[in-house]
């Protein structure tokens, strides 16, 4: 019942000053480490071939318990790493975009979410520049804060990105956005309130800017 099994000698490590001769070491046991549906790894135990003492049931129980604990820890670490990576990818997709360079316009923005550690929140802005057309921009706030609010801001921004390519009138675009957000609201919860300013900016030949603005609250 002991886990130890004699095998061929373990490949010898280089010997020399400060390096012991390990040519007599042999693999004593290989134990699978349990994971989430698949093994998390393997535990390899070695011993000196000159030590012929037989492993006891107590040794076997100790090895098994160690393997169980190590497997659980490694599986949990792997799961946490995947969750962190997923959260990082989602957070990156929700970050505020970089402002484009627009001839005739000077753009600037500052963003500071309520939960600074997350870098995301319910406030948002966006600018879409297309050469030969008026530059469109939006500034808004979703009710709430943190991750839940950031997810809603992502929906608003993506909806606006699609809608403003088929509708240029700011007031009409907000009506379409309102209908879109209401349709997308989960049936088991009320839609989130959104306050939003949407507009177009067109530099004038003689200087100055022509602005067309539309505002909506509680979309």
Image (spheres, helix red, strand yellow):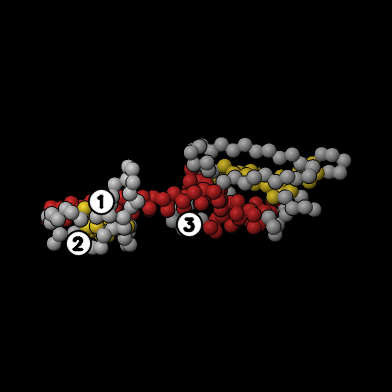
Q: Secondary structure at mark 1?
A: helix
Label placed on residue 208: none
Name which of mark 3 and mark 2 comes first in the sequence. 2
Pick the residue in front: 93 or 10: 10
Q: Residues within 10 Å of mark 3 (few under 14, many from 20)?
A: few
Residue 207 spot, x, y in % from top left: 84, 39
Q: Secondary structure at mark 2?
A: loop
Is 206 displayed left or right of 189 in the figure?
right
Where does label 1 land, which residue?
69
Of badges 2 and 1, the one in the foreground is 2
Name the residue: 33% across, 52% down. 13
Q: Examine the image and state in which quarter residue 208 appears.
A: top right
Name the residue: 51% across, 46% down. 149
Where does label 2 land, which residue?
5
Is 181 displayed left or right of 81 in the figure?
right
Of badges 3 and 2, the one in the foreground is 2
Disc 3 from disc 2: Cα separation: 60 Å
Is 54 displayed left or right of 40 in the figure?
left
Q: Is residue 143 above or below residue 39?
A: above
Label placed on residue 186: 3
Q: Secondary structure at mark 3?
A: loop
Disc 2 from disc 1: Cα separation: 23 Å
Name the residue: 44% across, 49% down. 84
Is 99 displayed left or right of 148 in the figure?
right
Residue 98 spot, x, y in % from top left: 64, 45
Name which of mark 1 and mark 3 comes first in the sequence. 1
Q: Is residue 7 visible?
A: yes
Pick the residue in front: 40 or 166: 40
Name the residue: 23% across, 51% down. 66
Disc 1 from disc 3: Cα separation: 41 Å
């Amino acid at each position: 019942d002991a886990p130890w099994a004699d095998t061929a000698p373990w490949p010898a490590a280089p010997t020399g000053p400060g390096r012991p001769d390990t040519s007599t070491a042999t693999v004593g046991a290989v134990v699978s480490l349990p994971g989430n549906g698949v093994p998390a790894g393997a535990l390899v135990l070695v011993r000196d071939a000159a030590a012929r003492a037989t492993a006891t049931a107590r040794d076997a129980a100790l090895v098994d318990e160690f393997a169980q604990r190590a497997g659980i820890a490694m599986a949990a670490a792997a799961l946490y790493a995947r969750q962190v990576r997923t959260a990082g990818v989602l957070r990156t997709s929700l970050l505020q975009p970089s402002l484009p360079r627009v001839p005739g316009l000077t753009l600037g923005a500052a963003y500071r979410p309520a939960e600074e550690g997350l870098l995301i929140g319910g406030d948002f802005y966006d600018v879409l520049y297309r050469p030969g057309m008026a530059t469109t921009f939006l500034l808004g706030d979703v009710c709430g804060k943190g991750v839940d609010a950031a997810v809603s801001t992502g929906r608003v921004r993506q909806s606006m990105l699609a809608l403003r390519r088929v509708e240029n009138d700011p007031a009409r675009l907000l009506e379409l956005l309102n209908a879109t957000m209401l349709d997308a609201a989960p049936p088991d919860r009320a839609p989130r309130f959104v306050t939003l300013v949407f507009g177009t900016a067109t530099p004038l030949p003689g200087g100055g800017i022509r602005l067309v603005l539309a505002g909506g609250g509680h979309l």
